[in-house]
Image (cartoon, rainbow, N blue to C red):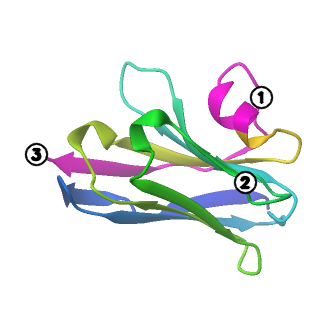
Amino acid sequence: QVQLVESGGGLVQSGGSLRLSCAASGFTLDYDTVGWFRQVPGKEREGVSCISSSDGGTVYADSVKGRFTISRDNARNMVYLQMNSLKPEDAGVYYCAADRLLTNQAMCFWSPRVSIEYWGQGTPVTVSS
């Protein structure tokens, strides 16, 4: 069964850190661009950060640059999002997604106009002020 499973979300105080993990099963992430997305009620899902398969190139939303770091461990079939200096506006449900054809730019910044092949079920992040 092909699936992505996120973990690591939770409640954190403003200024704190969380590390989200995305585990793939049923397929290998080696050749996929993988991204993290955030959705809050009443707003469109937005791309937070995406990492390419070919060279590990990364892109970030302006709002998280310098605070978040995406990384991948192909040996473990995992992708991570290290989130530091969290702000209340970072809260939401974070989803992991993967696609073999999209570039990191397309995945993160053309969503939802592009179709992404695999999605996880999401992990909630709450940041208290």
Find numbered disc 3 in the image and state the secondary structure of the residue it sits on. Answer: loop
Q: Residues within 10 Å of mark 2 (few under 14, many from 20)?
A: some
User: In this figure, which residue is indicated by the disc labeled 3?
Assistant: 129
Q: Amino acid at mark 3?
A: Ser
Extreme front residue here?
A: 66
- Looking at this view, is 44 or 84 the one in front? 84
Q: Quadrant of the N terminus?
A: bottom right
Magenta residues span 105-129
Disc nearest the viewer among 3 and 2: 2
Q: Residues within 10 Å of mark 1 (few under 14, many from 20)?
A: few
User: In this figure, which residue is indicated by the disc labeled 1?
Assistant: 115
The residue located at (71%, 58%) in the rendering is: 3
Q: Quadrant of the C terminus?
A: top left
Find numbered disc 1 in the image and state the secondary structure of the residue it sits on. Answer: loop
Corner quadrant of residue 78: bottom right
Q: Are marks 2 and 1 in contact (CB under 8 Å)?
A: no
The residue located at (86%, 58%) in the rendering is: 54
Residue 57 image position (x, y, % from top left)? 72, 54
91 over 34 or under it: above or below: above
Residue 63 image position (x, y, % from top left)? 40, 36
Disc nearest the viewer among 2 and 1: 2
In the image, residue 57 lies in the stretch drawn in magenta: no
Gap between marks 3 and 2 measured at Cα:
33 Å
106 over 35 or under it: above or below: above
Q: Amino acid at mark 2?
A: Gly
